[in-house]
DNA sequence: TCATAGCACTATATTTTGTCAAGTGCTTGA
DNA sequence: TCAAGCACTTGACAAAATATAGTGCTATGA
């Protein structure tokens, strides 16, 4: 029917978001913009990978990097409008996770989408 | 405030779903149950990794494995009810992907959640 | 005043993950 | 009868992620 090599945006988006730390980054930035080290601490990622991911996410237009000052280094990473729209994905995930990976009594109102951001070491 | 080692189900679910092929598997099985090789061909995964993922997904109760016959081997993989509920996540992703990774005119009705399943080699 | 801690990263080496190719034992369709 | 398919496994290899250390600089606090 359709040509075998058809480009599927959903397949592509999965390939993008399944890279390690990517979804964690999005979720963290959905809460608030952050600096590099701060973000690393929030999600628990190592600097090398974090740098790669942020570069990629900036390329595809999900993340926006703002340099406030070069020498006392001060940079902040925030989501672009397109990145913000991933809120719906994170919300759905949050809903599913609280329902299936924990106590079964959470009702999952589709409003905030983020109360917890701790990681389990 | 909260203890540092608090378990966060959302963090855990991201860690689960970011493993390579996992979301592809879920998306494929959301369309229809499939056999092992069939599934591998659908998403483009290699058998070794596919086997690992399916084992893991069965453990956590997302996928259900049914053996129809042992010796002409015939097995099928399907989503459990919990796995089915990931439809919302895939829908959100589909919506975002069609809006941001392709033509910008798709309106994204939250009904089917899956029209395309081709992969781009 | 002066060491200390923090910032945004990078470099290198090592470990962890994922992939490729081949092979298993059996059956069904040509 | 014989190639092709099924559900996987194994083992060697490549790619990705990690830890650790270090860069050059400054603002803070003792």
Image (tube, coloured by chain):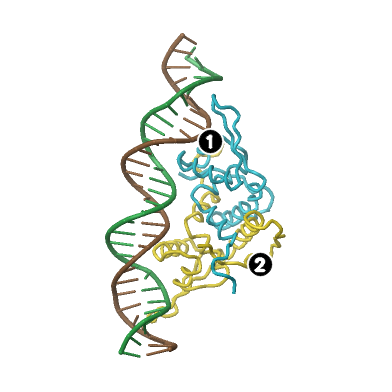
Chain colours: A cyan, B yellow, C brown, D green
Callout 2: chain: B
Residue A102's x, y, as percent?
54, 54
Residue A56's x, y, as percent?
54, 46
**Identity of the residue drawn at 67% across and 56% down:** B99
Q: Quadrant of residue D3?
A: bottom left
**Identity of the residue drawn at 45% across and 44% down:** A121
User: Mark 1 Cα within 10 Å, few/some/many (few <14, many 20+)?
Assistant: some
Q: Which mark is residue A36?
A: 1
Who is closer to the viewer here, A61 or B9?
Answer: A61
Q: Does residue A83 sit above or below B17 in this rendering?
A: above
Q: Does the residue at mark 1 contact the one at mark 2 (Cβ under 8 Å)?
A: no
Q: Is residue A21 left or right of residue B106?
A: left
- Cα–Cα span, label 1 and label 2: 39 Å
User: Mark 2 Cα within 10 Å, few/some/many (few <14, many 20+)?
Assistant: few
Callout 1: chain: A
Q: SS for tag 1?
A: helix
Q: Which mark is residue B112?
A: 2
How many numbered discs sit on the rendered protein?
Answer: 2
**Identity of the residue drawn at 61% across and 29% down:** A68
On the rendered image, what quadrant is the N terminus of chain B found in?
Answer: top right
Residue B61's x, y, as percent?
50, 63
Residue A91's x, y, as percent?
63, 52
Badge 1 and badge 2 both on one subunit: no
């Amino acid at each position: 029917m359709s040509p075998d090599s058809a480009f599927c945006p959903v397949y592509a988006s999965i390939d993008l978001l399944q890279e390690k730390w990517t979804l964690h980054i999005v979720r963290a930035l959905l809460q608030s913009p952050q600096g590099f080290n701060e973000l690393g601490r929030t999600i628990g990622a190592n600097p090398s990978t974090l740098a790669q991911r942020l570069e990629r996410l900036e390329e595809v237009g999900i993340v926006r990097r703002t340099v406030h000052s070069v020498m006392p280094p001060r940079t902040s990473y925030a989501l672009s409008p397109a990145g913000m729209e991933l809120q719906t994905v994170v919300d759905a995930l949050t809903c599913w996770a609280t329902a299936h990976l924990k106590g079964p009594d959470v009702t999952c109102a589709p409003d905030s989408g983020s109360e917890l951001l701790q990681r389990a070491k």
